[in-house]
Every structure is written in structure tokens, then in C-alpha cells.
């Protein structure tokens, strides 16, 4: 059996042999991207380089990226869905192209993973009648044929340019890099004979590889023009590959899940067989919550914190369905198994006690009200429809996320007035409607002109805080920037006075008025540290980094984007200063 660590080692070493440089996985929490709450793919962390910015490590990179996807949490429970997963990927920024990308994909699958060629099939882009200027991808098909894939095993899938489906990728937003895909499939069955002709609708064929061939760029008018820089984005989920190469048809039977599943069996005194759905949900949700908490997010009522709370509470509900006693701590033993599986992530070991404490607190909170809430919910279900007011009562008084109420109602043939809930939710709490509605689709950073100005302003703000508060130990703890405003979280133990806020604001504006030039340099992390650049110097940084200097005022490690000169920014205004969490303050600011 090939283990997770062995698969990762094989992958990274293979692409290093093809002159790729390894980059460390980024935080699950996006930087300067208001369109998404979590990183959902490896590609999301490197967008500037796909758009033409030079990467410090060159034109070929590879990595393993931790990811969270929350758009289909309710689907978790089958054999393939996961909230947290690892994506293995490699990229070319205007360097090698289609032939090398496909050949290396095939080589890794057949030579390194030892998958038999006769059990492989592929799809390629088959054209789109609504976009006659984009031809079907005969080039990719011919490359596959040259590698020994017969024509009968190559399927052309038509359409998809407008909506990003059927062998077409992107752009995720309205504009940006996009292009056709070619996907590799594996026949996952020992009993059925492999059919000569490939039918993508046959679920025995499992997708194991996706080469995104970014050869177009979509503009504001919706036109797909040939890209000046053609890119390769090659990614796949480690969990699925691991199950395929180990010849199991249930991802949860692999070694990255079995220790957790076995612990749940022990706690519940029940077997996995016959209780698959509940045990998968518990294992998945506690693993995802563990990873998110390690990156600094704790359970709460809004945004990322709401997702953590929702995951933990859904796991707790299913633990009770399995009959695990209320006084039994389920989170601590599961966290210990998760940390052992992923002991190569230092961030988990460093935050072990915090993870356990936060999970235990949330578990205790929900268990105090779970039984009462369930009794109330059962009474409401008799009406066949749960009103918005009742759904909000369950949320406010018993801690039931709306998604749990909807799920239980559906299980009992009832429905929920979600619009009514939203009305009550907004009226009584004024919390984030984005978080409650579950609108957590993955996206890419907005690199508009206004967002770029605010990004440079955020650098000025961080340095102005250090100077005004006479504290060089202040660190950025998070940021969220969109065209309307910037939000900066920073380490500081107390509320700022009105005088301090005014001084910070004036200091930023003085640098804007001074027309400071913004320069980008490439250097090693050691050189950046020696020159006084801001940044948390740990394993996150590799051989080279980008450092942005704003005059002599600010120097910070960053991937951009930024203005060329501070005079482009406009007038800076702090709108609000408040607490974000213990020891962390939050500033919201705008520019005019």
C-alpha cells in the first residue's frame, strides 16, 4: 500500500526532476481576497504569476496545498466528498506547454504510480458551437494518441466555454486566464472487463488528473482572446489518487482516514459497515475544523468562524445519532489521530492545545442545548413547515445553524422558511448574511485598480501603526480587501485612542502626498530579513521572495498587486477601529 507521505514524496521528486521548484503550502485563509473564505485550490495562491508577474522561483513550480471547500458540506457522507483535502499540483508560467504537460502526466501515472495503460482513458475539449473561434483540441488528442491511448479511449466533450464546464476551465471571475482542459480517467474495477470504448458517463471511470491549458484570456466584453502568456495548471486531489492507486473504492478506507474511523468505532462501539455516512461526516468535519483552527480561526457567528462552528456542530449531532454518550469527549481523541496522520505540518503540532481547547469548548456549548433543541425541532416538524421565526429561535436559543435545521427537517419530510429566517437573522443579530446563506464558492482575488490602491494603502497602514504605537512587534494577523474598503487585523492588546487613530491616518496620508515610489525586488528570505522587511520568517518562504518597498517608509514581503507611486492612492480615511479577537485589533478604511 502506498501511503500519503510516499505519494507526496514521489510527486514532488518527479516534478523536481523536471526542473520545478517546490513552494510551501499557503494558509487556508486567503490574503487580500474578498471573494472567498478559504483557499479551495493550489492555483488560487499563485494568481499574479498566471497573469504575468514574475515568480521569485522561476517559471516552473510544484507543491502540495491544503484546501477547504464548503459549497457542498451537506454532500459529505458519501465515499468521495471531503471538506478538507490536499491538492497536488504543478504549474508552468509561460514556459513548457501542452506536449510536456500531457507527457509528464502520463509518465507519472504509468511509470511512477504504475497504473496500467490499458485502464486509462482521457477527455479533451470538443469545441463549442457558441464560440466558433475556439477550435476543438485536436492537438491534445494527438499527443495522447502518440503515447499509446487509442482513439476509442479519447472522448471529445463539447461546450462549456460560457459556464466553465465540459473540459473548459475559467475564468473564475468575469475576466482572466482561461482555456481547455484534458482529463485522465482510470477504470476502477477488478471484476468488470475494461470496455474498448470510453464512456465518460460510466461511473466506473474515475477522474484522476486534470491538465488545464490556459491559452486564452477573457476580457470585460466576454471575448476570449489568445493569451500573451500561456500557462499550465495541473492539479488533482491527493485523497482520490491515494484511493485509486491503493485499489479501494471508498476514500475513507485509506490510511489518512482509517485511524480516525477506527477511533469513532471505538467511541461508538459500532462498526463502520452500516454506519458509513455518520462516521464519514464526523471524521471529515473534525479534520476540517482542526485544520482551520490551526490557521487561526475559531468557532464564531460569522464568516470563517461560522463554518468552523457549523462543521463541529454537525459532527456532534451525528455522534449522538451513533449513540456516543453525551459525557464522552469525542473531539480530543480524534484530534490526536489527525495530528499523528499529518505530523509533517508543524502548524498542527504548534497549535495542538489550542485546537483541542476550541473544539472542546464548542462541543460543550452545543451539547448543553442539543437535546432541548432537538425536542423543540421535533414539535415544529409536525407542522410540515418550519417558520423563519422558529428556525431563528433554534439558532439563537439552541445554537442550531440554519443548515442543521434544514437537514433535520428534510430527513423528516419537512421544509424551512429560509427567507423568513434570513429576515429574522438580519433584524435581530445583524450578522453576516454571507456566512449564514452558505455562499462560500471559491474565487480569485480582485485585482481591480481600486483594490490595488487599497492593497498599497494597507502596507502604509501597517507601518503607520508601528510608528504611532511605538511597537515594532505589531504583526498583520489577516486582511480582506475589496474595491470598497480595506480591512486589516493586527496584533495589539488594547483599543486605540481617537488621537492615535488620527495620527495613523495623517501619517498614511503624508506618505501618499509625498508621492513615494513603490519598488519590487527579488531576494532570499535572509536578505529580506536583513533589510528589515516585514514578514513572518518561517518555512512559508523558500529560496526567493518578492519585497515591495514604499519609499523609505515601508518594506514588506508580498506578492502584489501594488500601485507604482503612492500619489495614485487618493485620500486615506479610517472608518472604524475595533476588537477582532483576543489580542487582535481590526481597522476598516477607505480611500477617496
Image (spheres, rainbow, N blue to C red):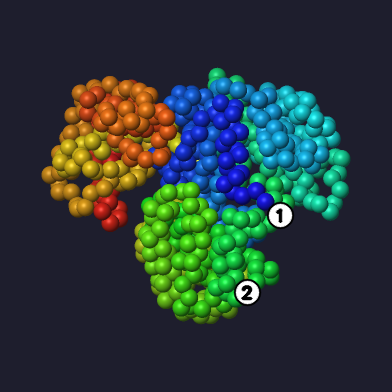
Quadrant hosting residue 26: top left
Query: Would residue 517 be found to the left or right of residue 148 on screen?
Result: left
In which quadrant of the rendered image does the C terminus lie? Answer: top left
Residue 87 coordinates in the image, percent (x, y): 56, 43
Residue 94 drawn at (x, y percent) = 55, 22
Residue shown at 40%/71% (left/top)? Answer: 365
Which dot marks residue 131? none
User: Image check: 156 left or right of 478?
Assistant: right
Give the number of marks: 2
Residue at 34% x, 38% y: name it: 537
Pointer 1 residue:
248
Coordinates of residue 564 in the picture (x, y in percent): 33, 22
Q: Is residue 128 visible?
A: no
Q: Secondary structure at mark 2?
A: loop
Viewer-proximal residue among 337 and 476: 337
Q: Earlier in the sequence, mark 2 or mark 1?
A: 1
Which residue is under mark 2?
270
Mark 1 is surrounded, within 10 Å at the Cα level, by few (under 14), some (14 to 19) or many (20 or more) other residues, namely some
Up the image or down, 481 lies above or below 336; here it is above
Residue at the farthest left position: 499
Amino acid at each position: 500500500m502506498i501511503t500519503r507521505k510516499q505519494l507526496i514524496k514521489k510527486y514532488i521528486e518527479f516534478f523536481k526532476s523536471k526542473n520545478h521548484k517546490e513552494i510551501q503550502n499557503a494558509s487556508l485563509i486567503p490574503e487580500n481576497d474578498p471573494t472567498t473564505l478559504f483557499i479551495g485550490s493550489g492555483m488560487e495562491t499563485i494568481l499574479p504569476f498566471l497573469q504575468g508577474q514574475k515568480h521569485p522561483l522561476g517559471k516552473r513550480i510544484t507543491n502540495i496545498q491544503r484546501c477547504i471547500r464548503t459549497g457542498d458540506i451537506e454532500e459529505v457522507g458519501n465515499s468521495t466528498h471531503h471538506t478538507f483535502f490536499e491538492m497536488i499540483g504543478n504549474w508552468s508560467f509561460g514556459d513548457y506547454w501542452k506536449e510536456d504537460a500531457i507527457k509528464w502526466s502520463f509518465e507519472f501515472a504509468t511509470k511512477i504510480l504504475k497504473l496500467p495503460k490499458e485502464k486509462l482513458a482521457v477527455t479533451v475539449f470538443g469545441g463549442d458551437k457558441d464560440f466558433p473561434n475556439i477550435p476543438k483540441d485536436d492537438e491534445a488528442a494527438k499527443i495522447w494518441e502518440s503515447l499509446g491511448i487509442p482513439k476509442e479511449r479519447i472522448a471529445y466533450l463539447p461546450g462549456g466555454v460560457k459556464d466553465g464546464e465540459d473540459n473548459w476551465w475559467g475564468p473564475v471571475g468575469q475576466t482572466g486566464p482561461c482555456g481547455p482542459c484534458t482529463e485522465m480517467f482510470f477504470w476502477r474495477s477488478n471484476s468488470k472487463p475494461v470496455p474498448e470504448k470510453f464512456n465518460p458517463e460510466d461511473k466506473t471511470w474515475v477522474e484522476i488528473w486534470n491538465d488545464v491549458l490556459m491559452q486564452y484570456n477573457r476580457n470585460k466584453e466576454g471575448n476570449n482572446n489568445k493569451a500573451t502568456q500561456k500557462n499550465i495548471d495541473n492539479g488533482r486531489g491527493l485523497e482520490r489518487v491515494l484511493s485509486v492507486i491503493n485499489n479501494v473504492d471508498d476514500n475513507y478506507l485509506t490510511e489518512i482516514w482509517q485511524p480516525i474511523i477506527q477511533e469513532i468505532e471505538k467511541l461508538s462501539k459500532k462498526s463502520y459497515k452500516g454506519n458509513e455516512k455518520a462516521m464519514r461526516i464526523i471524521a471529515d468535519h473534525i479534520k476540517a475544523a482542526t485544520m482551520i483552527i490551526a490557521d487561526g480561526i475559531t468557532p464564531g457567528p460569522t464568516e470563517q468562524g461560522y463554518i468552523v462552528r457549523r462543521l463541529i456542530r454537525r459532527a456532534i449531532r451525528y455522534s449522538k445519532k451513533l449513540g456516543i454518550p453525551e459525557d464522552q469527549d469525542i473531539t480530543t481523541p480524534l484530534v490526536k489521530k489527525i495530528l499523528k496522520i499529518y505530523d509533517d505540518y508543524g502548524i498542527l503540532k504548534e497549535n495542538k492545545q489550542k485546537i483541542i481547547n476550541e473544539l472542546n469548548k464548542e462541543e460543550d456549548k452545543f451539547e448543553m442545548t442539543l437535546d432541548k433543541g432537538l425536542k423543540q425541532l421535533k414539535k415544529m416538524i409536525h407542522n410540515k413547515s418550519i417558520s423563519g421565526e422558529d428556525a431563528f429561535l433554534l439558532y439563537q436559543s439552541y445554537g442550531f445553524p440554519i443548515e442543521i435545521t434544514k437537514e433535520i427537517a428534510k430527513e423528516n419530510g419537512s421544509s424551512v422558511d429560509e427567507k423568513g429566517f434570513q429576515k429574522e437573522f438580519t433584524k435581530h443579530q445583524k450578522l453576516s448574511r454571507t456566512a449564514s446563506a452558505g455562499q462560500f464558492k471559491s474565487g480569485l482575488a480582485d485585482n481591480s485598480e481600486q483594490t490595488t490602491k487599497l492593497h498599497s494603502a494597507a502596507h502604509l497602514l501597517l507601518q503607520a501603526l508601528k510608528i504611532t504605537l511605538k511597537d515594532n512587534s505589531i504583526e498583520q494577523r489577516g486582511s480582506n480587501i475589496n474595491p470598497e474598503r480595506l480591512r486589516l487585523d493586527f496584533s495589539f492588546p488594547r483599543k486605540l485612542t481617537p488621537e492615535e487613530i488620527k495620527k495613523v491616518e495623517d501619517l498614511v496620508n503624508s506618505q501618499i502626498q509625498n508621492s513615494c515610489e513603490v519598488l519590487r525586488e527579488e531576494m532570499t528570505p535572509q536578505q529580506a530579513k536583513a533589510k528589515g522587511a516585514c514578514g513572518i520568517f518561517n518555512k512559508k518562504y523558500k529560496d526567493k521572495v518578492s519585497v515591495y518597498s514604499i519609499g523609505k517608509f515601508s518594506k514588506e514581503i508580498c506578492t502584489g498587486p501594488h500601485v507604482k507611486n503612492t500619489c495614485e492612492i487618493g485620500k486615506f480615511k479610517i472608518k472604524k477601529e475595533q476588537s477582532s479577537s483576543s489580542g487582535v485589533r481590526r481597522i476598516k478604511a477607505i480611500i477617496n
